[in-house]
């Protein structure tokens, strides 16, 4: 009886804790948005963060995109060949990249590359009292540290996703057309016939924007909320990657359901 | 890192991103062909459209000249009414015929236009008179089997 | 203008249910160096954070430069903090900025000065702490003592009226320690600021401060000028000044009798 009550109490405590944390996170996110004015007035703050979130993630995004595209080209060819419609390879590669793989994989890579580093950086700034020092200098850390990182990363994400998709299509082209010898003309023309700018490409960009906001908000909050110890920061970093990966996949399902539900 | 180098890298990054989106829009998507170009719409009724979908290509001599913009059902004639959005660059005579075709054995369906001989050209709101619906595989197979059984029955009759 | 930069009357602070400070009275005159001493965990740092406005008092009056801290909103607090500098225990330099940019940080955030003027000001402040030559180094390249001196230069960048020091001597070698102590005294005198130093380095403090408050168990246990304290016969002060193991502050954390716990007496 007692152990049952205890376990119930444990569940209750977890739920309350979770809701409370969500409230804190929401307030933090709203404060970040409200305090964003300064970062846009001093745009070089954002440029710095575009560099560390975007430019530094370039290599991993470009290389992964190329390989994913090449694998798609290879696998797609194998499958399509059995139906004698290799020409549809371009369509297959482009649609899977632009609609799904580009935004999702780029966001997952972004979460582990840029998201974790944002969490670690902010967590360490907190642990070494840099944020407290800033506050003592009458500078709001949300406005000076958090908001520029938020916008820098949110701006970087769609760019990275587009580069990922473009690289992937290039990879599919390399394998399909150059290596295997699918007809180049039909590769591109079938692709163009099937891929719609608004329906597919724009929706992909919107997806990546949403993922960017989610990943960055999670990363910033985890860093800002981390206990100021080495262990706390390392746990927060892990949580950032896990939570934002789950958030990406969950959001992807919801967005896909809304965007591509039949015709 | 120096401010100037930083700005340069971010500049390269943003330009590369814009280039990627342009590449996706123009080379991968259909942005370059229609959405921005001016179009005119003609209608056509089909007995059966098979698996034709909105946005399916309209081809003439294999060239994409437009897209299906709308598919409806006429409850008087019990036929499908299809709106065809055609690029104004391409003009067709009034007696052009439309038929629904399939690219490859299992590929997607599209509308093929075959130009007629009339002097007057199609304009916005016109209707295509001569149409040929989709070939439904089941009907085809059914027909084939029917013919075959008839063919087998005939030689048997004189006996 | 009142002669006292800081006036604290009957100040209490509770962290959740636990009373950390009970009825503190403290004043600091302009141009003085005040030391707040006491054993670790006695509430010294809490007091410093209250003065800095990072915490709000539960009860009592805390006035800094004639402003009652309890009445301030965020905006007012930030206004007041521009007249304060704070030196954190390990400097808390921004690790992604060079020494120069660290010192320039408050100037760039709060003023619209042209870059040449900021350069001159930063070099002046760095010169005052003897680190003009280190302007281009990154914080990771500095020793602990140097980092704290850079942080001091940053704290005085906006010419504050009040500088708060949180454990400025912790973990320093004797030379750096002497240098830091002299620097605090010299800056206080030349800039005409008031310095509040939280420390437990008794010898260095007694050498350079004007007045000492001992905080123990949430109350001011003793106070006086360095000379008075050296001569004091009060057991707590005597224990602290001479670093004795036993006295009013026991070596043992409160525990049941040793013999009972080991179950020797049955």
Image (cartoon, coloured by chain):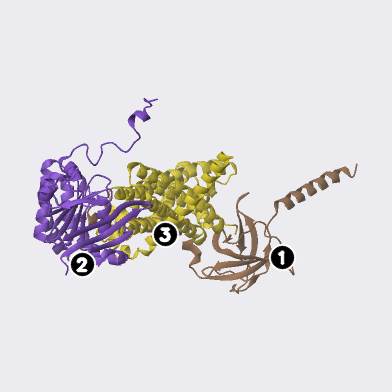
Chain colours: A yellow, B brown, C purple
Q: Position of residue A39 (x, y in %)?
A: 31, 62
Q: CA distance from mark 1 to mark 2?
A: 74 Å
For residue C187, what is the image quadrant? bottom left
The residue furthest right is B159
Q: Chain of mark 2?
A: C
Q: Position of residue A164 (x, y in %)?
A: 42, 50
Residues at marks 2 and 3, CA–CA distance in whole angstroms = 31 Å
Task: Tell me the tag on residue A27.
Answer: 3
Q: Secondary structure at mark 2?
A: loop
The residue located at (62%, 71%) in the rendering is B94
| Local crowd size for mark 1, using a 10 Å CA cut-off: few (<14), some (14–19), many (≥20) | some
Question: Residue tagged by mark 2?
Answer: C112
Residue A14, how many percent across, how many down? Answer: 49, 47
Residue B74 seen in the current view: yes
Q: Please say if the residues under marks 3 and 1 sit with CB atoms less than 8 Å apart.
A: no
Q: Could you tell me which secondary element the residue under label 1 belongs to?
A: strand
Q: Is residue C186 left or right of residue C250?
A: left
Do we see residue C131 in this rendering?
no
Q: Nearer the viewer, residue A235 or B156?
A: A235
Mark 1 or mark 2, whichever is nearer to me: 2
For the residues labelled 2 and 3, say whether their Cβ atoms are less than 8 Å apart: no
Spatial separation of the CA atoms under disc 3 and disc 1: 57 Å
Residue hosting label 1:
B79
């Amino acid at each position: 009886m007692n152990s049952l009550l205890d376990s119930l109490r444990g569940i209750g405590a977890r739920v309350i804790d979770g809701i409370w944390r969500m409230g804190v996170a929401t307030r933090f996110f709203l404060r970040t948005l409200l305090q964003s004015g300064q970062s846009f007035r001093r745009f070089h703050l954002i440029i710095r963060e575009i560099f560390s979130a975007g430019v530094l993630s370039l290599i991993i995004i470009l290389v992964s995109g190329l390989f994913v595209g090449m694998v798609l080209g290879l696998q797609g060819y194998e499958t399509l060949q059995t139906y004698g419609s290799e020409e549809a390879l371009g369509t297959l590669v482009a649609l899977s990249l632009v609609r799904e793989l580009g935004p999702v994989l780029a966001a997952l890579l972004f979460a582990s590359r840029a998201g974790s580093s944002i969490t670690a950086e902010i967590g360490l700034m907190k642990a070494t009292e840099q944020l407290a020092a800033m506050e003592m200098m009458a500078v709001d850390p949300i406005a000076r540290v958090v908001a520029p990182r938020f916008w820098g990363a949110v701006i970087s994400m769609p760019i990275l996703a587009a580069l990922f998709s473009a690289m992937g299509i290039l990879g599919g082209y390399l394998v399909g057309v150059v290596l295997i010898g699918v007809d180049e003309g039909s590769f591109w023309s079938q692709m163009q016939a099937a891929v719609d700018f608004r329906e597919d490409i724009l929706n992909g960009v919107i997806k990546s924007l949403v993922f960017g906001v989610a990943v960055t908000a999670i990363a910033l909050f985890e860093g800002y909320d981390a206990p100021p110890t080495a262990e706390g920061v390392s746990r927060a970093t892990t949580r950032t990657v896990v939570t934002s990966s789950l958030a990406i996949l969950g959001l992807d399902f919801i967005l896909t359901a809304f965007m591509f539900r039949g015709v | 890192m120096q401010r100037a180098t930083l700005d340069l890298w971010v500049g390269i990054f943003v330009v590369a991103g814009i280039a990627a989106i342009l590449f996706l829009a123009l080379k991968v998507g259909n942005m370059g062909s229609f959405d921005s170009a001016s179009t005119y719409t003609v209608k056509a009724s089909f007995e059966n459209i098979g698996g034709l979908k909105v946005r399916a290509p309209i081809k003439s001599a294999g060239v994409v000249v437009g897209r299906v913009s709308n598919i409806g059902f006429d409850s008087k004639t019990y036929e499908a009414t299809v709106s065809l959005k055609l690029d104004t660059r391409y003009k067709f005579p009034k007696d052009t015929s439309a038929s629904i075709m399939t690219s490859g054995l299992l590929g997607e369906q599209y509308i093929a236009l075959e130009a007629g001989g009339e002097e007057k050209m199609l304009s916005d709101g016109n209707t295509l008179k001569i149409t040929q619906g989709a070939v439904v595989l089941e009907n085809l197979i059914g027909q084939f089997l029917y013919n075959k059984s008839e063919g087998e029955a005939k030689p048997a009759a004189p006996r | 203008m009142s002669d006292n930069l800081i006036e604290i009357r009957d100040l209490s602070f509770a962290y959740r249910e636990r009373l950390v400070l009970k009825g503190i009275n403290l004043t600091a005159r302009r141009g003085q160096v005040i030391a707040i001493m006491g054993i670790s965990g006695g509430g010294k740092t809490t007091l410093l954070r209250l003065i800095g406005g990072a915490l709000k008092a539960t009860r009592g009056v805390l006035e800094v430069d004639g402003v009652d801290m309890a009445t301030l909103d965020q905006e007012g607090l930030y206004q007041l903090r521009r007249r304060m500098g704070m030196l954190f225990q390990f400097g808390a330099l921004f690790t992604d900025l060079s020494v120069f940019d660290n010192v320039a940080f408050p100037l760039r955030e709060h003023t619209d000065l042209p870059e040449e003027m900021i350069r001159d000001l930063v070099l002046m402040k760095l010169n005052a702490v003897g680190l003009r030559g280190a302007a281009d180094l990154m914080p990771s390249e500095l020793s602990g003592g140097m980092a704290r001196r850079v942080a001091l230069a940053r704290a005085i960048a906006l010419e504050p009226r009040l500088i708060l020091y949180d454990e400025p001597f912790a973990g320093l070698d004797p030379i750096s320690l002497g240098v830091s102590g002299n620097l605090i005294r010299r800056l206080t005198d030349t800039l005409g600021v008031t310095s509040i130093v939280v420390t437990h380095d008794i010898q260095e403090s007694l050498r350079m401060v004007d007045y000492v408050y001992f905080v123990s168990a949430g109350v001011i246990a003793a106070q006086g000028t360095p000379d008075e304290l050296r001569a004091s016969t009060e057991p707590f002060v005597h224990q602290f000044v001479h670093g004795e193991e036993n006295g009013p502050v026991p070596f043992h954390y409160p525990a049941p009798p040793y013999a009972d716990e080991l179950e020797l007496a049955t």
